[in-house]
């Protein structure tokens, strides 16, 4: 097994400090309703995301994480808002629905959460010799501390305050491209801890922060305490990892994980139709996605392309000199490099140094293998090749940990920003409100749809376009129009509304 030091040194609010001295800020992206948008609206979203991957040079880490729906938690939150004469009946109705949902779906109802991390830069020293000396000193100090030459690592309080300001500034910069919110400390704890509880609910300790020794100018994190987040039995096989974790009932629960890397990605993507991140929601088993990106400005990009093209042309010439067949991948590589060169020269766009990894996790080995093979087949239809690197499984496991660096460099792609934008990171199949009465499910993963009857009239919903209370219900005969309308009316009454039904055709009484 590859020996890898646990990458997290300390976390505070949404900041994660790495053992190498770097600091990352993590945010949760608000879901973007996407499934029912027209092409014009989809293209608008594409242009927003294109700006995210084109304009900002910061190193970024995208995470798409499946979580089991907590029906009871949603219900408890909603019950706090219920009022009216039928409040008790509404609460009883909600409890009965939760019981039925848990019986029917159990752990099979999954929703996805989206997180984006950014590697922060300290900008508090003016450009010039001072900045060079400061950077050189900190690079030396961090390296020396890693190898134990300067004793325990520390985090300067001045640096901590600066990173907080940088994290806030980045959130404000990207909000026109992607709406995000900064994580709280409990949530940061969760996105680290969940890597060791993939088949269980991670036991987050509310209010816990990594203990530190504090002095006037710095804090000294207690690394031993942080390592308790990683407690589990891990056995690394050639192409998968077996992990055993103790649940809240004291029993051992196994988890079988396979990590895959994208070895080939087309250098252009059709949009819409090839949303290669968004389409994960159309697969009937949970999948985790980790994408690490680093922008290369157009001058460096042209230099790298020239070198790559020359290497390929040398391979082609060598094969011809020795009367050997030139591989199709060489011809395609030269063509792609030539086309990208022309595009970069015309648009001055950067290239994005990208690595894409997937994780399949299941409670038994056969399910994990079956789902892994299915994922490989699904992406092959999109001309994306996935491999399960032998011997690199534990390295890829660590790449999913927030704040970590890229450990596997064999599957790096230099792609145009449009390929990442076409993936539609953060796009969802969401319908309805965040909480409310349950009215059905959407998508292959049975995500629950909720409705709060009084919410539209409050005009407090983010991105709300109208507060009109009119509704049109359309559909073919027998498709459930009357039933759906009656359900909405019934739930509105439970929620405290008063209703007058004008029913000339008798549809309300029939259903």
Image: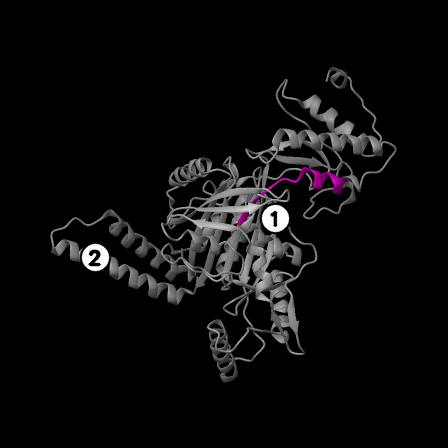
Q: Position of residue 256 (x, y in %)?
A: 47, 43
Residue at 83% x, 28% y: name it: 499
Number of marks in picture: 2
Residue 216 quadrant: bottom right
Q: Which numbered marker is on residue 202?
A: 1
Residue at 66% x, 58% y: name it: 185
According to the image, label 2 marks what residue? 315
Residue 76 falls within the magenta-colored stretch: yes
Q: Which numbered marker is on residue 155?
A: none
* Tag nearer the camera, 2 or 1: 1
Which is nearer the eye, 46 or 109? 109
Which is nearer the eye, 370 or 281? 370
Count neighbours of disc 2 (C-alpha within 10 A) and say few if under 14, some if 14 to 19, many if 20 or more.
some
Name the secondary structure under disc 1. loop
Q: Which residues are magenta?
A: 64-78
Which is nearer the eye, 347 or 172? 172
Name the secondary structure under disc 2. helix
Count neighbours of disc 1 (C-alpha within 10 A) and say few if under 14, some if 14 to 19, many if 20 or more.
some
Report how far apart the C-alphas of labels 2 and 1 lie in the structure: 51 Å
Q: Position of residue 411 (x, y in %)?
A: 37, 54
- One can see residue 283 in this view: yes
Question: If the image is split into quadrants, where does the C terminus sit?
Answer: top right
The reply, left or right, for residue 401 in relation to residue 208 is left
Q: Position of residue 445 (x, y in %)?
A: 56, 35
Q: Position of residue 84 (x, y in %)?
A: 86, 35
Vertically, is 120 above or below 335? below
The reply, left or right, for residue 478 in relation to residue 336 is right
């Amino acid at each position: 097994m590859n020996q890898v030091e646990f990458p997290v040194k300390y976390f505070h609010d949404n900041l994660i400090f790495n053992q190498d001295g770097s600091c990352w800020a993590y945010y949760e992206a608000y879901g973007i309703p996407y499934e029912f948008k027209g092409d014009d609206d989809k293209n608008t979203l594409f242009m927003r995301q294109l700006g995210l991957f084109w304009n900002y040079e910061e190193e970024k880490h995208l995470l798409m994480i499946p979580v089991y729906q907590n029906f009871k938690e949603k219900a408890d939150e909603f019950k706090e808002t219920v009022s009216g004469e039928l409040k008790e009946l509404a609460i009883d109705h909600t409890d009965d629905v939760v019981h039925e949902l848990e019986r029917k779906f159990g752990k099979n109802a999954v929703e996805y959460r989206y997180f984006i991390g950014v590697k922060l830069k300290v900008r508090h020293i003016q450009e010039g010799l001072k900045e060079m000396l400061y950077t050189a000193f900190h690079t030396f100090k961090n390296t020396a501390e890693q190898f134990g030459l300067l004793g325990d690592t520390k985090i300067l309080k001045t640096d901590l305050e600066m990173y907080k300001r940088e994290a806030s500034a980045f959130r404000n910069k990207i909000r026109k491209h992607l709406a995000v919110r900064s994580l709280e400390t409990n949530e940061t704890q969760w996105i680290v801890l969940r890597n060791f509880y993939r088949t269980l609910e991670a036991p987050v300790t509310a209010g816990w922060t990594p203990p530190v020794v504090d002095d006037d100018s710095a804090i000294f994190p207690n690394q031993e305490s942080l390592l308790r987040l990683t407690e589990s039995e891990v056995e690394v096989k050639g192409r998968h990892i077996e992990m055993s974790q103790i649940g809240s009932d004291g029993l051992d629960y196994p988890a079988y994980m396979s990590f895959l890397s994208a070895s080939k990605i087309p250098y252009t993507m059709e949009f819409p139709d090839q949303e290669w991140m968004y389409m994960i929601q159309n697969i009937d088993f949970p999948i985790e996605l980790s994408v690490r990106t680093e922008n290369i400005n157009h001058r460096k990009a042209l230099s790298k392309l020239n070198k790559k093209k020359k290497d390929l042309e040398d391979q082609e010439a060598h094969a011809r000199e020795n009367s050997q067949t030139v591989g199709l991948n060489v011809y395609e590589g030269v063509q792609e490099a030539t086309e990208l060169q022309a595009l970069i020269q015309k648009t001055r766009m950067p290239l994005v140094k990208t690595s894409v990894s997937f994780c399949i996790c299941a409670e038994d080995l056969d399910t994990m293998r079956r789902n892994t093979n299915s994922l490989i087949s699904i992406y092959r239809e999109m001309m994306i090749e996935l491999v399960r690197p032998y011997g690199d499984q534990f390295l890829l496991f660590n790449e999913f940990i927030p704040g970590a660096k890229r450990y596997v460099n064999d599957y790096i792609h230099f792609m145009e920003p449009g390929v990442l934008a076409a993936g539609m990171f953060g796009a969802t199949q969401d319908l309805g409100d965040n909480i409310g009465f349950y009215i059905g499910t959407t998508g292959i993963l049975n995500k629950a749809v909720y409705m709060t009857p009084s919410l539209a009239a409050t005009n407090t919903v983010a991105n709300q376009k109208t507060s009109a209370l009119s509704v049109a219900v359309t559909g073919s005969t027998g498709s459930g129009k009357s039933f759906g309308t009656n359900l909405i009316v019934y739930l509105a009454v439970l929620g405290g509304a008063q209703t007058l039904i004008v029913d000339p055709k008798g549809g309300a009484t029939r259903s």
